[in-house]
Image (tube, coloured by chain):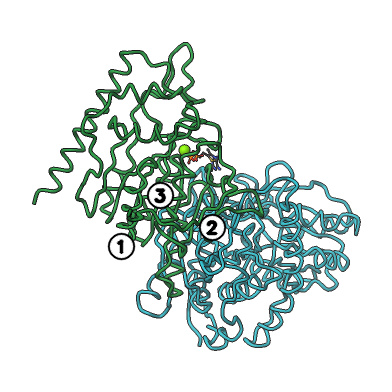
Chain colours: A green, B cyan
Amino acid sequence: MHRLTIPEEEYMLSGHTACLGCGATIAMRYVLKALGKRTILSIPACCWAVIPGVYPHRNLEVPLLYTAFEVTGAAISGIREALDVMGKEDVNVVGFAGDGGTADIGLQALSAAAERGHNVFYIMYDNEAYMNTGIQRSGSTPMGAWTTTTPGGKKRMYKWEPKKSVAEIMVAHNIPYVATATIAYPEDMISKLRRAKEMKGPKFIQILSPCPTGWRYPPDKTVEVSRLAVQTNVFPLYEVVNGKYRITIKPKNPKPVKDYLMMQGRFRHLTEEEIARIQKHIDENWKALLKKERCSQED
Amino acid sequence: MKMILTGNESAAWGARLSRPKVVAAYPITPQTSIIETIASFIANGEMDARYIRVESEHSAMAACIAAQNTGVRTFTATSAHGLALMHEMLIWASGARLPIVMSVVNRAMAPPWSVWTDQLDTMAQRDTGWIQIYTENNQEVIDSIIMSYKIGEKHNILLPSMVIEDAFILSHTSEGVDIPEQEKVDEFLGEYDPAFKLDPDEPAGFGSLIMPEGPYMEFRYKMALAMEDARKETGEVVKEFNEIFGRNYSPFVEEYRTEDADAVMVVLGTIGSTAKDVVDNMRGEGYKVGVARVRYFRPFPVEEIRNIARKTNMLGVADRSYSFGPGANLYAETKSSLYGFTDIPVKNYVMGLGGRDITPKILEKVFKDMLLISKKGVVDKEVEWVGLQGDERWS
Ligand SMILES: Cc1ncc(C[n+]2csc(CCOP(=O)(O)OP(=O)(O)O)c2C)c(N)n1
Ligand SMILES: [Mg+2]
């Protein structure tokens, strides 16, 4: 007999308007399964502002406040305070925003909400570019990627800067819970959401959500791409509970980053040297993370 | 209870008496003492509200929107750059049909930096779907905040309101104010009864994507009807308020000695009190002049302006801001209200920008210019800038 680790309840109905193979849609489904019915969502401008459907249709069975692009941190603060003042402390308040709405235009409001310590969840579904507007670079776009605003061209104008680590920025806010997750590891994601649910204060979870349309891979490969991101150490899965790091999935024999890159059209232009540079960057990040885990666990 | 209060303290009292449950605010001169006063009310247990110390005015409005949509009354305050930063969320608040009330202290926009009074900040927001009321004294500030909750929260209206006061002339000037009794305000406003809210027991979505054939246009049409309802209901609410609290506000335009006037000056805010003083003096000398102080700029008092035009031979419109191209906004609205109803001359006097003093002497000269035009029946120059450096005509 198997123990069911993923709740059976569905709060995301069929009939969404996302692209085939959308990782962000899978992320939402698990988030709602983990948090349950007594949840209020706030969603800014992003793909997920469109995915629930066109008025009057909505594929989510929880209350949903659509807001402007840069205000998720402020909006969840407002909902939380209003609920608390009405005595509805049991309701989960969840900001569900893209990487652009989190790492870039919404960072200010997020930082302020985290610093003020509201009892909220902030989920950054990270598809590593502005997808709603057609694949433009964000601060969360990884090194070497093609986007429509880093189109390569004769000058090889790709996104050469390293991906901004919003999770680390959130750790620096001294909030109770920060974690990374991805859709290929639903049990890991759900256990993180459940742990976060037990905690009071701001909870931040960054969910890598592959996007076949923007990353240029066939839509049936979403889970595979997500899994490879972890197995190559490109996107390590970890949590930081009250400042203590714990890597939740440690690949025994990490695969070469090249395997991950070559699956995706957005990286297909990369030369061997460039791939080597990215590999080095990923290795350094991984080592640094191991050190953080070791140091923060020491007492 | 009588107290000596600044305009900003009056605004804080107006908020306190209306019992908002969430206040989200960010400091900016000359508004700051409103939110400081509210902070101390809350800190001393005199006001029972959550206070969200946001990192920007954009977030202040976003937090008020989210809280109000969750089902509670909210309040915030700002000025100039803060209001401009809010612009996106102002349209959101009205489009979401949330009767938020906000104090706005009129301040000049940079560059160059200036903290003094100037109405460009609120004029630039006139198309955001907010009810806008310009006040003339501290009593009107406190009373208007209370009335704004009452008007905005009616289920056929559901629109947010800006209660506007001039920087320093009101915000930092103390005068005697009659504080309405809390029990009477409670009875007047009643419990906040949201028309809709975010509620896990009745899940609904607010603000989703809509196609051109979906009811976007109908939502906007309903807002237009709501603004017309606000026009109708404001009269009732002001009348009720006058009776309960012993005031005598006229709802949309305060007319001062306009009967038999040869020329009437149309003004907003504190220019009104100076102008009324000048009118008294000039009437003593036999000049037949009057003042029409417009209180509500949104909805704009079209009928009231037409009625005033029927009684007089000339309107001079004093604006404390400018719209580059057509001339200032109060002038443009006044003229468009009159088009086809009368052909009396209307002239725009632009004055007091960046807080430049508008003295009785200046206004007396403006009135005399108006009387001259009234006699001639034609305007010499449609838009006149009054009190520019080196221009001796008005000083
Ligand atoms: C103030 C503002 N600027 C720009 C936009 C246009 N816009 C809408 S969604 C979007 C990109 C969203 O990117 P992200 O947050 O990564 O979410 P995704 O679309 O990738 O899911 C942009 C630029 C906007 N809605 N508001
Ligand atoms: Mg994105």
Residue at mark 3: chain: A
Which residue is identified by label 1? Answer: A198
Q: Position of residue B24 (x, y in %)?
A: 45, 63
Q: CA distance from mark 1 to mark 3?
A: 16 Å
Q: Are marks 1 and 3 in contact (CB under 8 Å)?
A: no
Who comes first in sequence, dot 1 or dot 2? 2
- Left or right: where does residue A66 sit relative to residue A144? right
**Circle 3: residue type:** Ile
Residue type at mark 2: give it.
Leu
Give the side of residue B205 with respect to residue A249, left or right.
right
Mark 1 or 3, closer to the camera: 1
The crowd level at tag 3 (other Cα within 10 Å; few <14, some 14-19, many 20+) is many
Mark 1 vs mark 2: give the one in front.
1
* Res A232 quadrant in image: top left
Residue hosting label 3: A123
Quarter residue B169 falls in: bottom right
The residue at 28%/19% (across/down) is A277
Q: Residues within 10 Å of mark 2 (few under 14, many from 20)?
A: many
Measured from the top left, where is residue A41 in percent x and y?
48, 57
- Distance Cα–Cα, label 1 vs label 2: 23 Å
Which numbered dot is residue A64? 2
- Marked residue chain, label 2: A
Pointers 2 and 3 in contact (C-beta within 8 Å): no
Compared to residue B43, the image places residue B113 above or below, namely: above
**Amino acid identity at mark 1:** Glu
